[in-house]
Amino acid sequence: MKKRIIIGATGASGMPLLKRCLEIIKADGNFEAYLILSKSAEITIEHEMKIKIDEIKKLADYVLEQENIGAGPASGSFKNEGMLIVPCSMKTVAGINSGYTDNLILRSADVAIKEQRKLVLAVRESPLSQIHLRNLYELSKIPNVRIIPPVLTFYHMPENIDDMVNHIAAKLLEPFGIEMEGYRRWKGLNIK
């Protein structure tokens, strides 16, 4: 039986990361992706990527409606490895931090926390306000919550934007035990 991973996507910028994460999960073969798109995510996908929503949906094994609060991931008895929200808006961060579970993305995140499963948040905002930082700080104190902002790195010597997207996507999936082929880890410097 394949392991389940829940993928939420909200309306923040960063949809190429969502697409790449779904592609990596599909290529792994050991996982099945349960995708939940907010309405804002759907608008942002079409704006940022100039593609139809169906191109993203076909990368997931299952697509769940955000309004379907009765779907499997809304319950702790729905076995899964955890949840990745990519991109994760500050509205979503505030909802998770306050326990406000009025949709399936927020409820699934709440369940991940209560069941002590992995919850990885690819938070997107710049600059960060005091409110954002306070919410993120509170979430950072919860076991199994990982906050991984999609921050550019250069130590892996990226040659283009795709290299940067791949690197960040690999970092987002690593907590779930998903290894992207070609992921270039830091190997240290040979300083004399």
Image (cartoon, rainbow, N blue to C red):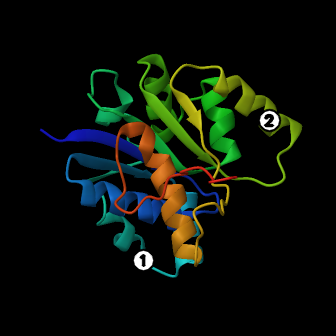
Q: Considering the image in quadrants, where does the N terminus appear? A: top left
At horizontal 65% and vertical 38% (from top left) the residue drawn is 93
Instruction: Say few, some or many: other residues with alpha carbon within 10 Å of mark 2 (under 14 / 14 to 19 / 20 or more).
Output: few
Name the foreground residue: 74 vs 190.
190
Inter-mark Cα distance, 2 to 1:
34 Å
Q: Is residue 42 visible?
A: no
Q: Position of residue 78 (x, y in %)?
A: 27, 28
Q: Can residue 191 be seen in this view?
A: yes
- Residue situated furthest front in the rendering: 192
Please identify the quarter of the rendering in which residue 27 is found. bottom left
Residue, disc 2:
133
Q: What element carries label 1?
A: loop
Residue, disc 1:
52
Q: Is mark 2 on a helix, strand or loop?
A: helix
Disc nearest the viewer among 2 and 1 = 2
Name the foreground residue: 121 vs 57.
121
At horizontal 60% and vertical 31% (from top left) the residue drawn is 96
Residue 96 located left or right of residue 62: right
Name the foreground residue: 150 vs 9.
150
Q: Position of residue 19 (x, y in %)?
A: 43, 65
Q: Where is residue 161 in the image (x, y as percent from the top left)?
A: 58, 75
- Residue situated furthest right in the rendering: 130
* Sequence-first disc among 2 and 1: 1
Cβ atoms at labels 2 and 1 below 8 Å apart? no
Residue 128 located left or right of residue 99: right
